[in-house]
Structure formats: C-alpha cells, structure tokens
Amino acid sequence: MTSADQVARLLALVPYLQQHPDADVRVTAALFNTTPRQLVADLKVLWYCGLPGGLPGDLIEIDMDAVELHGRIRLSNAGFLARPVRFTLDEAMSLAVALRALLELGDSGLKTAVQSALVKLEAVIGTEARVGVRLAGGEDETRDALAAALARGVAVRLDYHGPSRGVATRPLVDPERIVVRDGYAYLDAWSHERGAWRSFRLDRIVAVTPTDRPVSDHGAPPSPAGGWLDHRQDAVEVTLELAPEARWVTEYHPIRSAVIKPDGVVSVTLLVADPAWLRRLLLRLGPAVLRVEPPAAAASAAEVAREALDLYES
C-alpha cells in the first residue's frame, strides 16, 4: 500500500462513517478492500485530521475505546466536511488547468461534464486567458476507442506510425493506461509481439481496432527512470551552496543530490530547464545563496537585483 492509496481510502471512509454511525470494523474493512488492522491504522491517522489550528475542537474525533473493545466505529466532529469548498485563486487556477487538460485528453463522454465544471469555475475566476494548455493527445476517436477498450479489458490492434518517417506497424497490445509526459499523451501497453511493455504516442496512432481477446495480468508497467526533468534535453545541472536556513529547498524542489557540510552549509545539485524559474528562486533566497555553479546561471538574478537596488536608491 502507498500513501496515495491510504489518502484515497480516507477521503471515502469519512463520508461512509458519517452515513453509517456505529459501523462494524470487519464489515467496513471488507467494503474498503482492506484488513481490520489497516482500517484501525487509518482511523488513528484520522485523529490528526481536521481544520487548521489543531486544537481538540478542530480535529475529527473517533471513539477508539469502542473500536478496540467492541469493534464499532463512532466518528464525530467531522461536520465541516459538508461545508462548500472555498478555493484560493491559486487553487482555482490549478483546477482550471487540470480541467483544460481533461478537455484535451478525456474521451468524448467526459467532455460535457468537464466543460460544464470549467464554465462554472471560470465564471468565478474570470475567463481571460491566464494559462493555456496544449497537449498532443491525438484524435477524439482514438481516445474514445482506447477508453472503451480499457473499460472492457480487451486487447486492441493499433495502426501506429513510429518516429521514423514512413514506418508503420500494427501491433497487438493489452492497453493499461494513458499518461502525459512533457506535453505528449502516451498509451502504456503490453506488446504481444515484443513480449514487453511499450509506450505509444497517441498522436501517432492512426486507428484502434478492438478485439474480443481479454487482457492478461502483466504486472504494473515500469515508471520512467528518474524525474521528468531527466528527459528534458534543455535541462542543465546547477549546484547551489546554501546557508542552513535555506535547507528547505531540498524538501520543496526535486533535486539530484544534497550534501550537508560540517558548518551546516548545504550543497544542492538540481536540474534547471527554465532560467526564469531559477532566477525567481535565487531572488527569493537572497543572501542565503552562498555560491552558484556555473556562475553564469546566477547572472540574470544578479542583474535583476542590481536594477532593483538602483531603483531603490534613486
């Protein structure tokens, strides 16, 4: 089990327990496809969930005596979950971007619901173009056919044009999932001819022919090695020496390595694909940045800082 699995279960568990007071531990565990022991562990996590502040009246309450002695779950003080969600502007914009991505990638059955949600959201945050989403997601017919095959659990035959011009293949594959990497949508599928996992770009799939052959269990498809920046050809490696108070960078941003020296100085190596992003980070850190390697990576941040000082002193 991963933490993502547990969070998904907790999000469904609370409303279930609100609708089923005094629920039985074993019955509830079976409904959520987990063990009673894991369910009790989930309930102990819920003890620490609630509203900001963390005071007793802010947190979800569970009668753990009833759980451990009688196998009954009694949850209370979770009424705040029924209140309408209020988004900050950043949260609303993030949701709008995700909805626009679904418009580009989702099958036609989703588009009406997604468009309706997007219209309601943009009525609040404004419809002016703030963020655009462009994804190479192939044709609607391709996505619809793949979504239907995934729902039925059947193999499909692809008419696929590979990266080499003029080369077309018709592989028989067991489709597993559709993912997005660096602005392109891919189908991760088990190739029967290759006997291995393969990724197919949706915009290179010309046609999808479903079969009546059920897919087999091939295990989980492998994840791409490294982070998404590792596959960016324009990403460059930058090393920052940071004062101890800037150690939070190692926890907040994806990094390649971090070395803490005896004096508390942290040497952080990371990949940078956007110079503007690095400039903003350096300006935010200010004097906590002790050294940048290569020095040219910090040139634009130093120039912006000098211009700001000149304006301040004038």
Image (cartoon, rainbow, N blue to C red):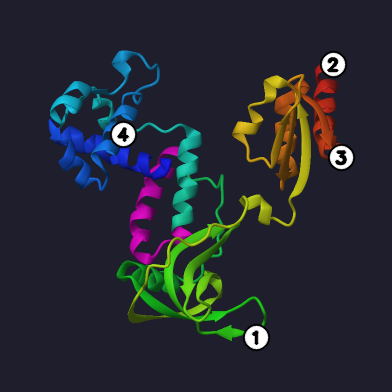
Q: Tag 1, which secondary structure?
A: loop
Residue 69, horizontal then vertical, whole percent: 16, 25
Relative side of 279 to 294, left or right: left
- Can you tell which quarter of the image residue 184 is in? bottom right
Residue under pointer 3: 296
As measured in the structure, the alpha-carbon distance from the residue carrying label 3 to the one carrying label 4 is 49 Å
Q: Are the residues tagged 2 and 4 within 8 Å (C-beta)?
A: no
2 or 4: tag closer to the N-terminus = 4
Compared with residue 137, is residue 162 higher up or lower down, i.e. above or below?
below
Q: Tag 4: residue type?
A: Asp
Residue 166's disc number: 1
Q: Tag 2, which secondary structure?
A: helix
Residue 286, horizontal then vertical, whole percent: 75, 23
Q: Residue at x 42, y 61 (%)?
A: 106
As measured in the structure, the alpha-carbon distance from the residue carrying label 3 to the one carrying label 2 is 26 Å
Residue 139's disc number: none
The front one of 38 and 174 is 38
1 or 3: tag closer to the N-terminus = 1
Residue 253, horizontal then vertical, whole percent: 63, 37
The front one of 222 and 102 is 222
The answer to whether residue 126 is visible is no
Residue 162 counted in the magenta span: no
Badge 4 density bin: few <14, some 14–19, many ≥20, Cα 10 Å: some
Q: Tag 3: residue type?
A: Ala
Residue under pointer 4: 42
Q: Which residues are magenta?
A: 103-126
Residue under pointer 2: 313
Query: Viewer-nearest of labels 4 and 1?
Result: 4
As measured in the structure, the alpha-carbon distance from the residue carrying label 4 to the one carrying label 1 is 54 Å
As measured in the structure, the alpha-carbon distance from the residue carrying label 1 to the one carrying label 3 is 43 Å
Residue 147, horizontal then vertical, whole percent: 37, 68
